Structures are given as C-alpha cells and as structure tokens.
Amino acid sequence: MEILVVVVLVGLVLSVAGFLLANARKDNRDIKRLADVEKIRDALEFYFYACNRYPASISTGSSISGEECGGGVYLSVVPRDPRGVDYKYVPCVLESTWRCEEGINNAESYLLEYTLEGNSAGISAGKHAANPTSLY
C-alpha cells in the first residue's frame, strides 16, 4: 500500500513538473519572438533612415542592408520564429488609404506579422502585426 501511495505521489509531481516546464518553454519562445520582432523593426528603421523608404521584401536568413542607397548592413541575418515559421513582412504605401502587399517599392510603412503562444509583455496570445510605431 505504501509503495502505491509513493508511486502515485511521484506521478503527480512529475505531471506538475512537466506542465510547468511546457509553460516555461512556451514563455521563452514568446520572449524570443518579441526580441526578434524588435531586432527586425530596428533594422527596418535604420534602412528607412538611409534609403528614405522601407524595403520591398525581406527574407529569413538574409540580411537587411541599405548598401544600394549608401547605408550599411543593419541586420546580418533575419531570424526565424522559434517554431521554424518565417515572420511575414508586408510593405505598405499610403494612397487614399494604406495599401499593404508584397513587393511594393518605395514603401512608407510595413506590417511584420508574428504569433504569440501565450500572453507576454502585456501582449495577448494570438496573431499580431508590428509596424513602425507599434509592436501590436
């Protein structure tokens, strides 16, 4: 009987520990996502200041560089989401309203889409789109 109680208690402790570990991993992935988005946003702002526009596209694994307009390399490697998904970058231009679609040249803004698994840094779980003025 005592062995059965010990086995049940050990199982309960392991279950709780597994749950807490899974949540900690999820939180760490979200923290990395937010840091990645901030890095990309910073690099895009440096690009904008050098080129007076945002790039028509960026891709995971490549750099964000303003060398074609006299700038430097602002981010040597565009990171990938911790789950292996690419962050989606969409440039925008102001016409009568904002138009955002891939490949826009002379972009005046952008959307950088990412998804959080849980609530992190005051941002709720789910899909979000950062832009030059906001992380949400």
Image: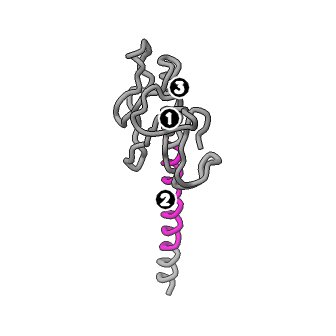
Neighbor class of circle 3 (other Cα within 10 Å; few <14, some 14-19, many 20+) is some
Q: Are marks 2 and 3 in contact (CB under 8 Å)?
A: no
| Residue at image mark 2 | 22
Q: Amino acid at mark 1?
A: Cys
Rendered residue at 49%/72% (across/down):
10
Earlier in the chain: of badge 2 and badge 3, it is 2
Earlier in the chain: of badge 1 and badge 3, it is 3
What residue occupies the far right of the structure in this picture? 122
Locate the C terminus and report the quarter of the image it occupies.
top right
Residue 92: mark? 1
Judged from the image, the secondary structure of the residue bearing numbered disc 3 is: helix
Nearest to viewer (mark 2 / mark 1): 1
Q: Toward the viewer: 10 or 129?
A: 129
Q: Toward the viewer: 46 or 24?
A: 46
Expressed as whole percent of the image width and height from the top left, the position of residue 79 reads: 41, 37
Query: Is 9 part of what is drawn in magenta?
Result: no
Expressed as whole percent of the image width and height from the top left, the position of residue 91 reads: 47, 34
C-alpha distance separating marks 1 and 3: 14 Å
Q: Amino acid at mark 3?
A: Glu
C-alpha distance separating marks 2 and 1: 37 Å
Rendered residue at 62%/45% (across/down):
121
How many numbered discs, if any?
A: 3
Q: Are marks 2 and 1 in contact (CB under 8 Å)?
A: no
Height in image: 20 above or below 56?
A: below
Magenta residues (range) = 10-32
Q: Main secondary structure of the magenta part?
A: helix
